[in-house]
Amino acid sequence: MCKPALAALAIAAAALAPAPAIAQQAETPQMLPGDAITNPSPSAEEVALGRALAETGTLAALAPLMTGQETEQMLADLPDLTPAEQDRLRAIAAATAAAGRGRLLDALGRQYAMRLSAEEMRALAAFARTPAAQKMQAALPYTIAGTMQAVGSIDFKGETLAALCAETGKGCAE
């Protein structure tokens, strides 16, 4: 399944994970096929460059949209709140989102610093400051949401197993 709600869940889970869990992940990253950690112990300057790069990325663009949607859903789920309580919920949500976003972008910046050189991060950050890149960044949440609406549900596992079942008779759903 691949929906905007799934993206929101992934971002919210990462953003709201306890800080120690993120710190532990940064120290012992899970290697994926094709992963190339070239700098397992980046300097403070490299981590700062990575954080600056993270500020220009997809997660930074999507987080405000997703947390805004989640906040509005919480308000809809709590119709008995007074206007003052609604304002308080929005304030708490904004503070929680900012803290989670900070942890998420710190962790992402460290991951960039482990895989990209300082020169590469500077070049990418410079590109991200161009008008064309900024326009793309602003459009990103809406293009992703529109793509997810156009594509609909994607069940990678289900579709793969159904095709395997049709070919081999194995992996069939019961």
Image (cartoon, rainbow, N blue to C red):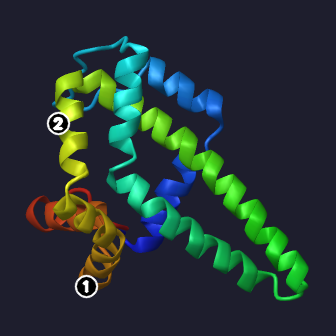
Residue 163 against residue 105 in the figure, above or below: below
Left or right, residue 5 beside residue 34: right
Which quadrant would residue 137 be assigned to in this image? Answer: bottom left
Whole-percent x, y for residue 78 in the image: 81, 82
Camera-side residue of 165 and 30: 30
Whole-percent x, y for residue 121 in the image: 23, 32
Which quadrant would residue 80 be assigned to in this image? Answer: bottom right
| Identity of the residue drawn at 52% across and 46% down | 14
Q: In what element is the residue under mark 1?
A: helix
Kind of residue sitting beneath label 2? Ala
| Identity of the residue drawn at 63% across and 33% down | 19
Other-residue count near label 2 (Cα within 10 Å), few / some / many at <14 / 14–19 / ≥20 = few
Alpha carbon separation for disc pair 1 and 2: 34 Å
Q: In what element is the residue under mark 2?
A: helix
Disc number for residue 123: 2
Please tell me which of labels 1 and 2 falls first in the chain.
2
Left or right, residue 25 beside residue 132: right
Kind of residue sitting beneath label 1? Ala
| Identity of the residue drawn at 13% across and 68% down | 166
Left or right, residue 60 beside residue 73: left
| Identity of the residue drawn at 63% across and 56% down | 97
Disc number for residue 55: none
Whole-percent x, y for residue 9 in the image: 52, 61
**Is residue 61 visible in the rendered structure shown here?**
yes
Q: Mark 1 touching mark 2, by CB under 8 A? A: no
Residue 41 against residue 127 in the figure, above or below: above
Q: Mark 1 points at which residue?
A: 150
Whole-percent x, y for residue 17 in the image: 61, 42
- Mark 1 vs mark 2, foreground winner is 2
